[in-house]
Amino acid sequence: MTGVPERSEERTALDGNASESGPVGARELCTRQSRVGPIRMSSDRVGRCTRGESAGLKICALDDQTRRQARESCGATCSFRRSRARRRTVRLEERENASGREWVPMVLVRRWWPIAALLAGSVVVQKAFFESRYDVAGHAAGHLSSASAPFFGFAVIATLLFVTPPARRQVPVLISCAGWLAATVLVMVGNVRVVDALVRAGQGRTPTDALVENGNVESAHDLANVAPFVAVAAALALVGALFLYRHISRRLAIGAAVLSAVFPPWIIPGAGVLVVTIARCASYQRAATQTSTTAVINT
């Protein structure tokens, strides 16, 4: 029985200290009790802080400190996120400026160097290994220039397939490309026969107006006169195949077909193929530019 009054006296003293100190004393008491670790609103901590008549003040003190710590933590996190977003924006602007001004030539070189190498190689082979074999002028020189159609045609077809990757797996497009190349080879064979006939007849440097026709020269012109129109038909088939697989628009297909039929075939046999290739190069460049811009923004 003697233990009960002692406990009540200790409790009375504790309550008396709390009441004398007021809210400040309650907060100090709660703070001293919570020094064992960070302030968290756990059930055992609330249980220790709710003894006596100042339980409400102690809980409020814990709530205030918890809220203050939460606000400070949230403020630091938000500040960090804002600074990181600002740094990311600056990096994006720097990349866009670099890709838009400083690195455009390098990007174009990396994108188009295979085509440039192909065209240069075709011209070198034509000049060094084909045209250098003949020393002609006048009418024979015109036929020799027309005989270079396969070199030009090979470069055009390779460029077309390079800028149109799906066409490499489409059999009708590949067959039409091969057919047009074969027709340009016929053009070369026919014109080379004419050049050889003129050289044998001693008219390798004779102008067209002063040309003396004979049986060999006339028969040599037969294939040279027919082959360009075969190339025009093959060019129309190629344009149709590209339109069939939606690589070109209807308007472009009609324009290319009309140009192939109207343009002199002894100059460019099937000029519409060249127009289609240029249009595909423009589409390829636009698509590659849009892809690069999207990749920079998403980085």
Image: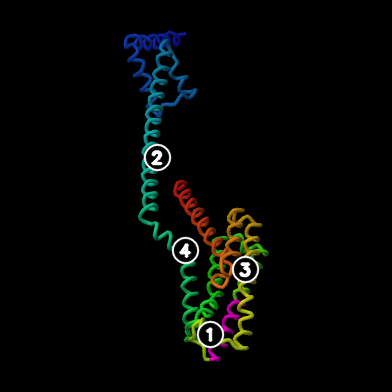
Task: Give the mark toward the camera: 2 or 4.
Answer: 4
Outermost residue to the right:
172
Residue drawn 62% across and 68% down? 232
Q: What residue type is labelled 3?
A: Val
Query: Is residue 263 toward the left or the right of residue 39 in the image?
Result: right
Q: Which of 47 and 191 is in front in this view?
A: 191
Task: Give the mark toward the camera: 3 or 2.
Answer: 3
Residue 10 x %, y %? 39, 12
Q: What residue type is labelled 2?
A: Ala
Residue 129 x %, y %? 50, 83
Q: Residue 85 carries which label?
A: 2
Q: Can residue 161 be seen in this view?
A: no
Q: Is mark 2 on a helix, strand or loop?
A: helix
Residue 195 lies in the magenta stretch: yes
Instruction: Give me the C-alpha separation between circle 2 and circle 4.
Output: 36 Å
Q: What stretch is highlighted in magenta?
A: 185-201
Q: Mark 3 points at which residue?
A: 232
Name which quarter of the figure residue 90 lies in: top left
Q: Name the residue under label 4.
A: 112
Q: Residue 185 carries which label?
A: none
Q: Mark 1 points at which residue?
A: 211
Task: Kindly check if marks 4 and 3 are in contact, taking CB atoms under 8 A apart as contact.
Answer: no
Q: Is mark 4 on a helix, strand or loop?
A: helix
Residue drawn 44% across and 26% down? 40
Query: Counting other residues with Cα less than 10 Å from the Cα at mark 4, is it few (<14), some (14-19), or many (20 or more)?
Result: some
